[in-house]
Image: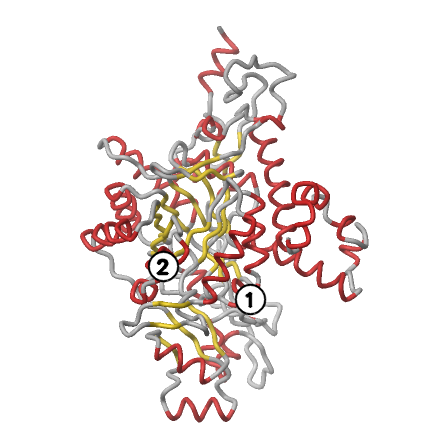
Amino acid sequence: MNLRQPNANEATSTVNRSRNVVPCSGICTRCMDGCKGSCEIWLSSFRGREVLYPGPFGGMTTGADKNYPVDYSHLNIQGYAVGAKGLPEGTDANSDTAVFSMADTITEYGREKKVKMSIPIFTGALGSTEIAQVNWEHFAVGAAISGITIVCGENVCGVDPGLKLDAKGKVIESPEMDRRIEIYRKFRGDYGEMLVQMNVEDTRIGTAEYVSSKHNLETIEIKWGQGAKSIGGEIKVTSLERAIELKNRGYIVLPDPTVKEVQAAFKAGAIKEFERHSRLGFITKEGFLDEIDRLRDIGFKRITLKTGAYSMVELAMALRYASEAGLDLLTIDGAPGGTGMSPWPMMNEWGIPTFYLQSLAYRFSRELEKKGMRVPDLAMAGGFSDEPGVFKALALGSPYFRAVCMGRGLMIPGMVGKNIEKWLQAGDLPKSVSKYGSTIDEIFVCYEELREKYGTRIKEIPMGAVGIYTYTQKFRTGLQQLMAGSRNFRLSTITRGDLMALTTEAAGISGIPYVMEARFDEAMAALLD
């Protein structure tokens, strides 16, 4: 079975001329001299490295579409006709008390100073990509009013046009970072938080020191990697001056904007954009533990770690180091991941897929626990979009996993809400929206609920935030239904026993019993005793 056909994809705006394509190469069975396009090889012949990246940059997000042999769809959730775990203490379980709307979806993470979230999801890292920057208000306010954590990703200070550095190259002013924190805090409640992520360049310019000293931010995240790529973060810039500025700040910029022939090609119109890349990290146990001590000395109350779809050795390192360092959360991001900018071939062809990676993480966590070591609170990321997937991830990783990090799944409602507001203002609502109404009150089913809660401040809430809130309410209700159906009325009562594997392959990878074997002994007892 072919898992991915290369050489043409909507993500790279390429197609095959022929209906018949060689599965392993993605080349048309009959490749014609004189073809006018446009597969990836054809387009690469004159646009070169541009074809590595999905586009248009800043106007889309991308998720790889390699169809892995086993994923979470190979698991199903058990349903029961008896029992009710997790009801409030002293509550008798019966048909009047065990209703699905009573299921408690609140989760928490942290070693000592814990953070609660209203539902067990939080945003992926929204860093220096243009789509994160232009939509930040929608995403940040949406997360705040929904009671979930938002992650401000890497390089935000480093690419800030208004960045000011001192004589030692450390941040003394970053208007973009200031804006992001201030927007989030306008509506922050008792649930969720904003944390800032940092990579090699962020560490060098003192991002951690800046957000702690100026904003008293409580949580910082170290980034080892992500699911979409095994190299550093990337953005595109379309100005020669901007490309030179970023290179002078210490970033890798390609093609090199300081080279004479590159400048000539840009002025001629052949080169239309530059790529800004972050550096690869190099991890040692001693260096990592020293960095944790340094961050605690700065004043952070919580420290988290984000790692990617690396080999199982790096996964083991992340778990062991996070345990020894007493970290508050470890987020594990599996392949293929989603992105605002990552190389399309790499997205599809690198890394351990999410299902396999979480299964390994569970096994490694058990080994740590057997050794008497604390397993840090864990979160899984990489391709989640709905409540059944999140339930399965929490159950598969029970009791170690507290939440799921969702990238594109939480960005989409923000962009939808934002665009509905634009279409309303332009008098150009598409039929897919106008069939529900012609005003904000009619279109958004949760708008009146938010108006009741925030009163006149509702005018300060952007429609993208309303979109995220509306989506999270649907998510919460759907999750409550799944919890009640499996007779779990608290997230903490969900266990691996609430899952069954539909294929022997999934059972072998995950350790979840095959459907024809799951609870077989109990069934025989009910049948024969």
* Between 161 and 172, the one nearer to me in the picture: 172
Look at the picture and state if 482 lies above or below 170: above
Residue 249: percent from the left, percent from the top?
35, 75
**SS assignment at label 1:** helix
Categorize mark 1 by other alpha carbons within 10 Å: few (<14), some (14-19), many (20+). some
**Residue 198: mark:** 2
* Between 179 and 420, the one nearer to me in the picture: 179
Q: Tell me the kind of residue under disc 1.
A: Ala
Q: Is residue 277 left or right of residue 29?
A: left
Residue 50: percent from the left, percent from the top?
48, 77
Q: Is residue 339 left or right of residue 449?
A: left
Look at the picture and state if 59 lies above or below 43: above
Categorize mark 2 by other alpha carbons within 10 Å: few (<14), some (14-19), many (20+). many
Q: Residue at x 52, y 47 (%)?
A: 384
Look at the picture and state if 407 lies above or below 8: above
**Residue 11: mark:** 1
Q: Tell me the kind of residue under disc 2.
A: Met
Which numbered disc, 1 or 2, marks the residue that appears first in the sequence? 1
* Between 259 and 522, the one nearer to me in the picture: 259
What is the tally of numbered marks visible in this picture? 2
As measured in the structure, the alpha-carbon distance from the residue carrying label 1 to the one carrying label 2 is: 28 Å
Look at the picture and state if 343 lies above or below 334: below
Q: Residue at x 59, y 71 (%)?
A: 15
* Between 239 and 20, the one nearer to me in the picture: 239
Residue 453: percent from the left, percent from the top?
66, 41
Q: Is residue 91 left or right of residue 201?
A: right
Q: Residue at x 68, y 61 (%)?
A: 419
Q: Is residue 87 left or right of residue 256?
A: right
**SS assignment at label 2:** strand
Residue 25: percent from the left, percent from the top?
47, 68
